[in-house]
Image (cartoon, helix red, strand yellow):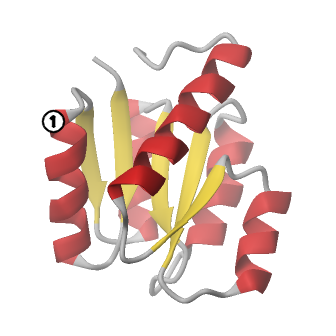
Amino acid sequence: MEKILVIDDEKPTLSMFRLFLDAYGYRVYTAENGADGLEIFQKEKPAIVLTDIKMPGVDGLGVLRQIKEIAPETAVIVITGHGDTDLAEQAAELHAVDIIHKPIKKEALDAALDKARQELAAKGRNGDS
């Protein structure tokens, strides 16, 4: 079962992701802040991480930067509810697989997950670790 980590400071968003991703067959881990998310990441080593970009403490760009330092092959999808193109550009420069906007649409999530799986396959990682 593929592991996936979702980091977001909004509990309803985490619940929505858990519902969708459980249904898709992922083993879902969640964190309400970047520091906790990085701790879970180090322990569980999920192949795919979704992180909100604006959070107190360690923000999504900080999470993305640290995950890419620890495990560059990880597919990171950035979530934004703020339509901030500067942050989106920075996320792309840091090799985010995709950027999806709140409110999350199922089609956007599906497309981002497909991109993540394609990138993992290209890097020879199947996501089952």
Residue 41, percent across and down? 44, 43
From the image, tell me which residue sits under label 1.
23
* Residue 38 visible, this orientation: no
Q: Is residue 124 left or right of residue 117?
A: right
Residue 5 in percent (x, y) is at: 37, 46
Splitting the image into 4 quarters, where does residue 72 fall?
A: top right
Q: Nearer the viewer, residue 101 or 90?
A: 101
Residue drawn at point x = 42 percent, y = 76 percent: 102
Does 4 appear above or below 88? above
Quadrant the C terminus occupies = top left
Residue, x 26% and y 54% (percent of image)?
30
State the image quarter where residue 68 is shown.
Answer: top right
Looking at the picture, does residue 25 appear above or below residue 92?
Answer: above
Q: How many marks?
A: 1
Between 109 and 53, the residue placed more toward the observer is: 109
Q: Assess disc 1: are there few (<14), some (14-19) or many (≥20) residues with their C-alpha within 10 Å of its C-alpha.
A: few
Residue at 21%, 26% in the rendered image:
25
Q: Taking 30 as reference, is 114 left or right?
A: right
The image shows residue 38 at horizontal and vertical percentages of 47, 54
Q: Can residue 24 be seen from the camera position used here?
A: yes
Q: Secondary structure at mark 1?
A: helix
Q: Is residue 1 above or below residue 42?
A: above
Name the outermost residue toward the right: 93
**Residue 105 at what x, y percent from top left?**
37, 63
Residue at image position (66%, 40%) is 70
Q: Quadrant of residue 123?
A: top right
Q: Disc 1 residue type?
A: Ala
Instruction: State the quadrant of the N terminus.
Output: top left
